[in-house]
Image (cartoon, rainbow, N blue to C red):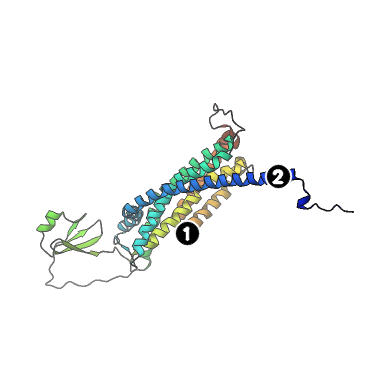
């Protein structure tokens, strides 16, 4: 006859007591971990709130910083230095978004530190060395990507797109003969508006051209100046919305930050033993094609930005090959410096 399973009341008291003790121990451990996780989350939030306040205080300067590449590109293309807000809340929401992203970016090291304090007790010394190496490398690559975006990619891309739009549809205004009794007034060309004391001496109706704002300015009353934007050409007016532009910048920032993690991904693949650097080195042409495709995917805008990002990705690919050769997993596990030793290799 087959064995009939015993009922719970047929187990001896010692077995039931051991099971009860094990469950109690598991509940205690989970409770301790939940308490530690709750404390780390509170500490992380406490670090975000002051930075969020700073972001709201300096939100105007931060928004100006993000808008500056567009303003410079408009100025170089001889277009009006103006950005539109087509809704009452558009500028306000852009201000809030900039402040929030500033707080999240600047608080990321603090949040990662709290996460590290939570998981570090469960890691071996060799595992901690990998984290000590990967987090600074990822941070440096992200910072390099943001510098590349702000100083190179955005200025070139925006300038090209503005010139392309102005030259796409043009109309020749023709020529009109001047009447014989035409009179002309002199209009000054100035890099900025006159100083307050000089402006007070000018009669009402005086005009000048502000080359920084690309506007024809007129003194309409004492202490009041009106400006008329001047366009360098093209039928399609180059007037951009602040909400759309900031959304574009943040989307590009995310794409570039992800793309610049290529050396890190290559190194992790090498550490996992999936592929070696000498194997990847034989496929440089394929890698160049992949980088070109990546440049098109992460910046779906214009050929200049695609080529620039594709070239940057290929340089990062070569840097990844160097890292795979110079920093193998065994060296990181033993410590980057050869003379560094740890007596607690197997201890937590």
Q: Residue at x 47, y 59 (%)?
A: 300
Question: Label 1's element?
Answer: loop
Q: CA distance from mark 1 to mark 2?
A: 65 Å
Q: Considering only vertical position in the picture, is 280 above or below 77?
A: above
Q: Considering only vertical position in the picture, is 17 above or below 78?
A: above
Q: In terms of depth relative to the viewer, which is nearer, 302 or 83?
A: 83
Residue 282 visible, this angle: no
Q: Residue at x 58, y 50 (%)?
A: 286
The x and y percentages for residue 179 are 15, 73
To which residue does mark 2 refer?
17
Task: Give the mark nearest the N terminus, 1 or 2.
Answer: 2
Question: Which residue reaches farthest right?
Answer: 1
Q: In terms of depth relative to the viewer, which is nearer, 178 or 37?
A: 37
Q: Is residue 292 left or right of residue 223?
A: right
Which image quadrant is residue 214 in? bottom left
To which residue does mark 1 refer?
300
Image quadrant containing the N terminus: bottom right
Residue 110 visible, this angle: yes
Dot in front, 1 or 2: 2
Q: Is residue 59 left or right of residue 6?
A: left
Image quadrant containing the C terminus: top right
Q: Residue at x 60, y 33 (%)?
A: 347
The x and y percentages for residue 303 are 45, 57
The x and y percentages for residue 142 are 46, 46
């Amino acid at each position: 006859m087959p064995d009939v399973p015993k009922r719970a009341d047929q187990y001896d008291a010692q077995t039931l007591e051991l099971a009860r003790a094990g469950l109690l121990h598991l509940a205690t451990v989970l409770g301790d971990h939940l308490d530690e996780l709750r404390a780390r989350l509170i500490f992380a939030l406490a670090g975000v709130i002051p930075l969020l306040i700073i972001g709201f205080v300096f939100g105007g300067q931060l928004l100006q910083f993000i808008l500056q590449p567009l303003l410079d590109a408009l100025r170089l293309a001889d277009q009006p230095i103006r950005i539109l807000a087509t809704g009452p809340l558009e500028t306000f929401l852009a201000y809030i978004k900039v402040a929030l992203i500033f707080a999240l970016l600047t608080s990321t090291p603090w949040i990662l530190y709290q996460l590290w304090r939570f998981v570090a007790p469960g890691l071996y010394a060799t595992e901690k060395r990998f984290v000590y190496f990967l987090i600074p490398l990822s941070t440096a690559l992200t910072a390099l990507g943001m510098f590349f975006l702000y100083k190179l990619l955005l200025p070139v891309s925006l300038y090209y797109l503005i010139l392309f739009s102005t030259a796409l549809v043009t109309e020749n205004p023709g020529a009109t003969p001047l009447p014989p009794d035409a009179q002309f007034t002199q209009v000054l060309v100035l890099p900025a508006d006159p100083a307050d004391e000089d402006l007070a001496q000018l009669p009402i109706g005086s005009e000048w051209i502000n080359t920084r704002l690309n506007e024809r300015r007129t003194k309409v009353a004492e202490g009041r100046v009106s400006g008329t934007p001047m366009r360098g050409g093209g039928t399609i007016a180059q007037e951009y919305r602040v909400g759309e532009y900031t959304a574009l910048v943040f989307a590009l920032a995310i794409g570039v930050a992800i793309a610049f993690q290529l050396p890190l991904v290559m190194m992790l693949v090498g550490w996992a033993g999936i592929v070696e650097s000498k194997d990847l080195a034989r496929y440089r042409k394929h890698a160049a094609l992949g980088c070109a495709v990546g440049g098109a995917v992460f910046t779906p805008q214009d050929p200049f930005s695609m080529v620039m990002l594709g070239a940057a990705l290929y340089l990062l690919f070569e840097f990844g090959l160097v890292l795979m050769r110079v920093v193998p997993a065994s060296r990181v596990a033993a410590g980057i410096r050869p003379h560094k030793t740890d007596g607690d290799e197997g201890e937590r």
